[in-house]
Amino acid sequence: MKFLISPLFFALLSTAVLAHAPLTKTTPENGAQLADAPTEIVLHFAKRMRLTRVQLTLENATSVDLEIDGNQEFATQFTIPLPTIGRGTYSVEWRGLAIDGHIMNEGISFQVQ
């Protein structure tokens, strides 16, 4: 029985891992220190996904939902315009639905000096 369960377990585990759409690159990069404030955020994913929410937070202030209209189709890259921002440390948190149906969320941060 062990011989049958082990391969099945690893097959299911590897399918679940391969199914997600991880974030592969962002502009600005996570942890970036910028001289000028960016006008947009670009998110690149390994596989197609659909964004459902993106929030911007300045340090410990209230979060602001960013406009994602036009970015709600399944894709591997999203460009989200930013409002005019000043100096400080910002975090961008996103939430989305991977093409396989898994809900995913993650965040990045950057600093404008």
Image (spheres, rainbow, N blue to C red):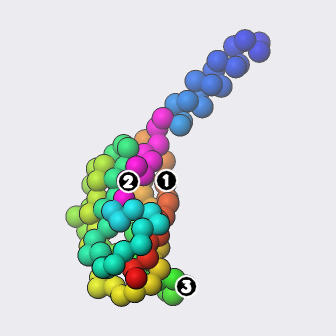
Q: What residue is shown with label 1?
A: 103
Instruction: Please tell me whether residue 108 is drawn above or below residue 16 in the rendered image.
Output: below
Q: Which mark is residue 112?
A: none
Q: Is residue 103 magenta?
A: no
In the rendered image, residue 58, in percent from the top left (x then y), is placed at 46, 83
Q: CA distance from mark 3 to mark 1?
A: 26 Å
Q: CA distance from mark 2 to mark 1?
A: 19 Å
What kind of residue is marked 2? Answer: Lys
Q: Indicate the quadrant where residue 7 lies.
A: top right
Q: Give the mark nearer the N terminus: 2 vs 3.
A: 2
Q: Which numbered mark, 2 or 1, is in the foreground of this view?
A: 2
Q: What residue is shown with label 2?
A: 25
Q: Give the mark nearer the N terminus: 2 vs 1.
A: 2
What kind of residue is marked 3? Answer: Asn
Q: Can residue 55 be seen from the camera position used here?
A: no
Q: What residue is shown with label 3?
A: 60
| Residue span colored magenta | 18-26
User: How dense is the environment of label 2, judged by Cα within 10 Å: few (below 14), some, or many (20 and up)?
Assistant: some
In the rendered image, residue 103, in percent from the top left (x then y), is placed at 49, 53
Tell me, yes or no, whether the two marked residues, 2 and 1, touch with CB atoms within 8 Å: no
Q: Indicate the quadrant where residue 71 lies.
A: bottom left
User: How dense is the environment of label 3, judged by Cα within 10 Å: few (below 14), some, or many (20 and up)?
Assistant: few
Residue farthest toward the right in the current orientation of the protein: 1
Which of these two is toward me, 90 or 8? 90
What kind of residue is marked 1? Answer: Ile
Q: Which numbered mark, 2 or 3, is in the foreground of this view?
A: 2
Q: Which quadrant, please, contains the N terminus?
A: top right
Q: Residue at x 28, y 50 (%)?
A: 75
Q: Which quadrant, please, contains the C terminus?
A: bottom left
In the rendered image, residue 5, in percent from the top left (x then y), is placed at 70, 19
In the rendered image, residue 107, in percent from the top left (x then y), is placed at 48, 64
User: How dense is the environment of label 1, judged by Cα within 10 Å: few (below 14), some, or many (20 and up)?
Assistant: some
